[in-house]
Each structure stands twice: as structure tokens, then as C-alpha cells.
Amino acid sequence: MNPHFWWYLSRASGIVAWLMLTVSVLWGIVLSTDLFPRRRRAAWLLDLHRWLGGMTICFVAVHLGTLVADSYTHFGPRELLVPFASTWRPTAVALGVFAVWLLVAVEATALAMKRLSKKWWRDVHVASYGVFWLTSIHAALSGTDTAQTLYTVTSIVAMAAIIFAVSYRILSRDLPKRRPKHARQRSSRPSTANDNV
């Protein structure tokens, strides 16, 4: 076996976890807009968002497990779960630790959504934006693939997509809501004496 197998696997699983997180956050933003009206929304659309979140957790677990298995950096449970406990790039690793704890909080409240108040669930779920940015900075500061062109281009595209989607989400709150077609036709019809009765 290649002596760097676990190191390669930890890098790959970290990148895949970050990509899954990116798509999950983007899909969550899409679901929160009127692109898919709530009354016509198929159940699989929400299931896809949940699946992406679950896959993110799975790949994060692989990332952490392979870091422990790798002999190059000597990570243990303490270094992976306690911010600034690692002596290897402590700030970069601490950002990753914070991201993991936030991700666990978001995923736990998503699974317990029906038992929580909508406001409390939403307040915690907004932390997924923080998870994305903490993970992106963690990868940029601690990742050994940041010099690769493909990684750089993917990072720029992912960050631009998140910024655009969040901006659209914020701005769409201030836009006037579209009324259904039949309501527009009713309001544009000239009033008659019978309408006032």
C-alpha cells in the first residue's frame, strides 16, 4: 500500500465534503425562494437537500477518520474536536473544527425539525452559511491542493455561486410577490354592478 494513501484519502474526502456542502447550501437557498412554489413542490426536492446534507456529514467523517489513520500529521480525537489543540497549522485546523461543530448543530436541528419551533430551527439553520465560509477558509489555509488550477477555479466558482444565491435570496424578499394568473385576471377585469353587491 502507498504510504501516503490515508493522506490522499483525507484530502480527497475533504474536498468532496466541501463540494457536497456547497451544493447543499445552494439547493437550500433555491428551496427558500419562489422558484419552486411551496404548494407545487415535490417531496423529492426537499429530500435531495437532506441527502446532500447527510452526504456532507459522511464525507466529513471519512475526512476526520483518515486524518487519524494517517501517520504524517498525527491527529487524534483532541486535535479534531478541540479548536487550537493541533500544533499543525493551528488556526486553519481550528476553523475546520468550528465548521464541524456548526455542521453537526445544523444537521441535528434539521433531523429534529418537527420537534423545534420554526424560528429556532431557522436561526440555527442560517449557520450553514458560516459552515461554508469556515470550511472554504480552512481548505485554503490548510489544504495542500490550493495551488492546483482546478481547485482554484472550483473555489472561485463555488464562492461566486454562494454570494450570488445569497444576494438573490436577500433581494427577492423585497421584490413584490407575483400573484397567481387567475387573481391578476380578476383584478384587471372591469367592475360591474354585480361585483359591488
Image (spheres, helix red, strand yellow):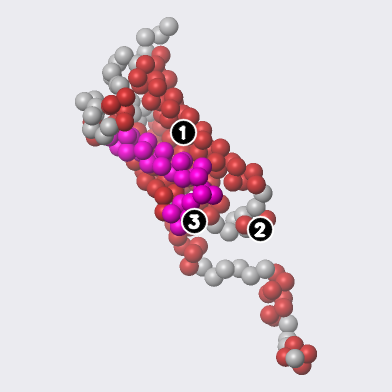
Q: In this view, does 32 lie to the left or right of 91?
A: right
Which percent across, then down, holds residue 107? 46, 41
Q: In which quarter of the image is the C terminus?
A: bottom right
Start-end of magenta stretch = 94-121
Q: Is mark 2 on a helix, strand or loop?
A: helix
Rendered view: 113 above or below 152: below
Q: How crowded is mark 3: few (under 14 residues within 10 Å), some or many (20 or more)?
A: few
Residue type indicated by callout 2 = Arg
Say which residue label 2 marks: 39
**Which residue is at the far left?**
87
Residue at 39% over, 20% down: 66
Quadrant of residue 47 in the image?
Answer: top right
Q: How far apart are marks 3 and 1 (CA)?
A: 23 Å
Which of discs 3 and 1 lies nearer the camera? The answer is 3
Q: Main secondary structure of the magenta part?
A: helix
Residue type indicated by callout 3 = Lys
